[in-house]
Amino acid sequence: MADGIAIADSVAALRGHVAAWRALGLSVALVPTMGALHAGHAALVRLAAARADRVIVSVFVNPTQFAPNEDFSRYPRTFDADCARAAEAGAHVVFAPAVEEIYPPGFSTTVSLEGPAAAGLEDRFRPTHFAGVATVCAKLFIAAGADIAVFGEKDWQQLQVVTRMAADLGLPLAIVPGETIREDDGLALSSRNRYLSDTERAAAPALAAALRACAAAIRAGRPVDAAVEEARQAVTQAGFVLDYLEARHPATLAPVADGSGPIRLLVAARLGATRLIDNIPV
Ligand code: PAF
């Protein structure tokens, strides 16, 4: 127990909590996180608490979704603050397994993905990422046995990948999206924002601003390709190194030919050593 919230460090302990809740007829929500909880995570926990009687927040920095050159070892770990934040937002249990609990010796199974996981967005720059995400999410879903799992829209491709996986595998839970929470200047909240220097932080809102301008231009009738190209230039001129900025179908993430159907704009770009992602609807 920490900060008034129970901590389960094993699947058996987590299932004990869930079994007790189920015996009382209570519904259960899971909010999967890698810790470093911020106001965006708190909003997901509040959404979960509004939809279910009991809320589990998992805190697990999942090694399999990081490539060797990525920030696994320096990913922020703020466990005590995470427990306090989860409790304050309405969670009942923090599930915080060790790596060996999720990946015991001999672990050899990975969820294999196509569709939105192979859209040429995050997967183009992080080719092993979604297999790691999907595998750990499948394990978390099975461990928790929750009725719903809440995922932030900020990781839009992840949300589509997990939604597709849950449908394809017939997993008995609903994936519930939670809207992106932003700073006053438009920067989407992210655990990685803390890596930004003061100068980078001042430049960072240009990412969301470029998406907003692009969406407005498309809504006003500008051809999608031209609007997207202008947004790419705006991001680059603001000092970012662009990985991608694309207009895609919101669910399949297939490229869109024109502005006639639903469109999601998605961007990933680096400011110094920090990689930021964002997305908005048109
Ligand atoms: O979005 C995240 O924090 C992670 O990708 C998730 C869903 C917790 C899986 O490790």
Image (spheres, grey):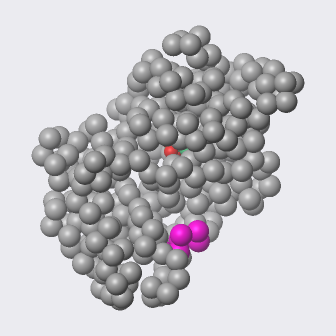
Q: Position of residue 73 (x, y in %)?
A: 38, 32
Q: Residue at x 77, y 55 (%)?
A: 169
Q: Which residues are magenta?
A: 248-253
Residue 105 on the magenta segment = no
For the N terminus, which image quadrant?
top right
Q: Position of residue 133 (x, y in %)?
A: 57, 47
Q: Quadrant of residue 207?
A: bottom left
Q: Position of residue 184 (x, y in %)?
A: 28, 48
83 vs 203: above or below: above
Q: Main secondary structure of the magenta part?
A: loop
67 vs 6: above or below: below
274 vs 244: above or below: above
Q: Residue at x 42, y 21 (%)?
A: 81
State the residue in front, 128 or 136. 136
Q: Quadrant of residue 268?
A: bottom left
Q: Residue at x 17, y 40 (%)?
A: 197
